[in-house]
Image (spheres, rainbow, N blue to C red):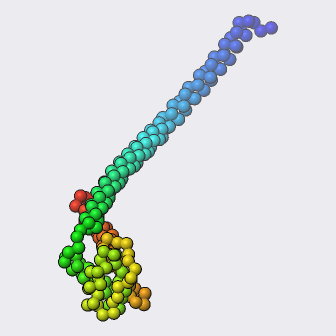
Amino acid sequence: MVSNFALEETIDKILHNNEKSVLSNIQSGFIESQKTLDNAIPKLEQEFDKIISDGKKEADKIEKQIIGSSDLEARNKQLLALEIAIDKVFTKAIDQISNMTKSDDYSNLIKSLLEESTQILGTTNVIVNTNSKDKTIVQNLLSKYPGAELSSDTIDCLGGITVKSKDSTMKFDNTLDARIQRMKPLIRKEIASQFGVGN
């Protein structure tokens, strides 16, 4: 029978060897973990930098959208205010035109409208329409336009004329209303450029 002392010595040796092996395994595991951690740090730093960079880009994008949106909103408000002001000016002008008294100047205006209309259509062989207020003025002027005749129908307009070729292939609206509408975009553009709106 083995003595207790020898048994204890054997157990101590085994424990000592196992302890060395376990400590060695722990030590090499720690070194491996340290290497893995050391290798992972640059990667983690890159990932962190990328997240920060992406976050800044997204923040810049959102900031530009907000600024762009408020710039667009301000521009739209300017355009709306401009449009309202222009409409008021045109409404006032139309009121003044509709309430003005017919003078020699007005008769000259109708004459120039007739000349312009027949030149555009390329013929004096036309039927002319006007409103009831301008009928007498137009009738007096038509004697200078061979082939031109005044329609018995009247039109609803501020003044001026519409001219249609007798074969009905061409028509030109030269009423004051139509002329105002044709001028409106040009005037709007001119006013907008004066105030630096809409550019």
Tell me where residue 21 sits by quadrant. top right
Q: What percent of the width, then of the height, locates residue 78?
A: 31, 54
Location of residue 196 by image quarter: bottom left
> Which of these two is toward me, 137 or 36?
137
| Residue 75 in sight | no
* In-image side of 63 versus 188 (left or right): right
Say which residue appears at 54% left-offset and 31% top-offset: 33
Q: Residue at x 34, y 72 (%)?
A: 157
Q: Position of residue 99 (x, y in %)?
A: 26, 66
Tally of numbered tags: 0
Name the image quarter holding residue 154: bottom left
Residue occupying the point 23% across, 73% down:
102
Viewer-nearest residue: 117 or 55 = 117
Percent x, y for residue 31? 53, 30
Q: Is residue 17 above or below residue 134?
A: above
- Residue positioned most to the left: 104
Q: Is residue 91 visible?
A: yes
Which residue is nearer to you in this view: 179 or 138?
A: 138
Q: Position of residue 30 (x, y in %)?
A: 55, 28
Dividing the image into 4 quarters, which one contains the C terminus? bottom left
**Residue at left offset 30%, top offset 61%:** 91
From this view, report whether residue 176 is shown above or below residue 51.
below
Q: Quadrant of the N terminus?
A: top right
Can you name the residue that lies furthest to the bottom here? 146
In depth, the one of 148 and 62 nearer the eye is: 148
Q: Residue furthest top?
A: 4
Seen in the picture, residue 92 relative to 25 is either above or below; the reply is: below
In the depicted structure, whether residue 135 falls above or below residue 19: below
